[in-house]
Amino acid sequence: MDVKNSNTYGGVAAQARIRYTRPLLLALMAILLISSLTACSGNSSAGETASPSAQSASPSAPPARLAQATPGATPLTTKATGQIYLYGESHGVAKIMDKEYEAWSDYYHNKGLRHLFVEQSYYAAEYLNLWMQSDNDDILEELYQDWEGTQGHIPYTKTFFRKIKSGCPDTIFHGTDIGHGRETTGNRFLSYLADHNLTGSEMYTLTKEVIQQGWFYYRSHNEVYRENKMTENFIREFEKLGSESIMGIYGSAHTGVDKMDIITQSVPCMANQLHKYYGGNLHTEDISWMVKDIDRIRVDHITLQGKKYTASYYGKQDLNGFKDYASREFWRLEGAYEDVNKLPLTGNVLPYDEYPMLIEEGQVFAISFTKTDGSVEREYYVANGKQWEGRDATWKLKITE
């Protein structure tokens, strides 16, 4: 089974039975990126106006933090010296959000941190800050509806933010992603600022700029551009804080200090770039593995090369949308490694992150693929410790029965 894996904010896409290759278009993307950066930097507000129908559930008067917004960004003369604590997540997983709240509560109460960076657009985070000072959930409900279609649109997301509001009430959110929800959250926030005579503020300027980033990204789907802009936006927000330390929550694709962007593998990911800039002040922890910390569903038995093995079943994945394939199911063959680890390999791989459960070296797996015509193919993979293109992977065994 050959797989191509891609991980964006919208989710993971795998192409079954297609050898992972880097498109020749990457070179063109690099050229496009250079030209786009030049174009966007000089036209951050082109074509963007607040929707006249956009209604805000925000308070009738802005809190002092907005009312005192400066006309423009203050020039930076020194590099920020605070600590950065990044957590890499799988989006929309309740137990991961619980872990993140536990970490934030510890930093908040025991280390005095107040600034929480999130993989949201600048204006979404500012709306969260307004909500933190409101006496109802109207703003949160609006944001939640804006997130429909994303992995964050699960009810527990609201629970997570409510826990922060209740337990860590002085939290200040910072959004450093490009402009998602431009025509909803973005335009609504522009209208809010205009209604409160803040069109000359830095907040208005940054909102327009981030909206423009979103326009470019969704027209081009240029992942290199997004990764670089996320880094640029992060540095802009962090530099405002001087010596204050922060915690950040981002998809794990953006938090590896030695990783490249997961789509094109052509530029360092956000945390990699930040590490080069801030050095030992950056600390990261990948907790995305928690989504796969699951128990087996049932116990079956599978015979491989004449020997019957206990087979722990971990469920079915839908492959609708992939040519000729409908689904695949996963088993771990207990105690099979010593029997099969000397068998020849086909050269095909399945990366660890394609499995629904955690993988350890020395394990053997049976995977059944159900095709759209109803036929079933079974393949066997071994976790032998060998990587594939820098990624932990299982390798397909050549079985003759």
Image: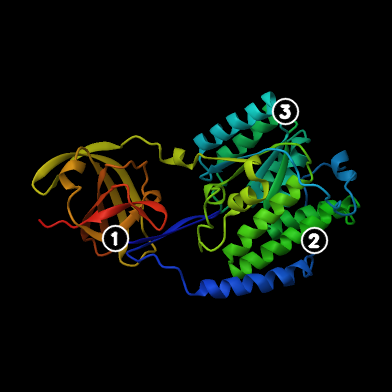
Q: Secondary structure at mark 1?
A: strand
Q: Do the numbered discs 3 and 1 sit on residues whose CB atoms are within 8 Å?
A: no
Whether residue 54 appears in this view of the structure is no
Residue 38's x, y, as percent? 73, 71
The residue beneath circle 2 is 50
In this rendering, the answer to whether 323 lies above or below 391 is: below
Whether residue 262 appears in this view of the structure is yes
Q: Amino acid at mark 1?
A: Asn
In this rendering, the answer to whether 7 lies above or below 373 is: above
Q: Label 3 vs label 1: CA separation?
A: 50 Å
Q: Residue at x 76, y 54 (%)?
A: 188
- Which disc is residue 348 wearing? 1
Q: Amino acid at mark 2?
A: Ala
Q: Do the numbered discs 2 and 3 sit on residues whose CB atoms are within 8 Å?
A: no
Callout 3 crowding tier (Cα within 10 Å): few <14, some 14–19, many ≥20: few
Q: Label 2 vs label 3: CA separation?
A: 37 Å
Residue 359's x, y, as percent? 34, 42
The numbered mark, 3 or 1, whose residue comes first in the sequence reads 3
Q: Secondary structure at mark 3?
A: loop
The numbered mark, 1 or 2, whose residue comes first in the sequence reads 2
The residue beneath circle 3 is 112
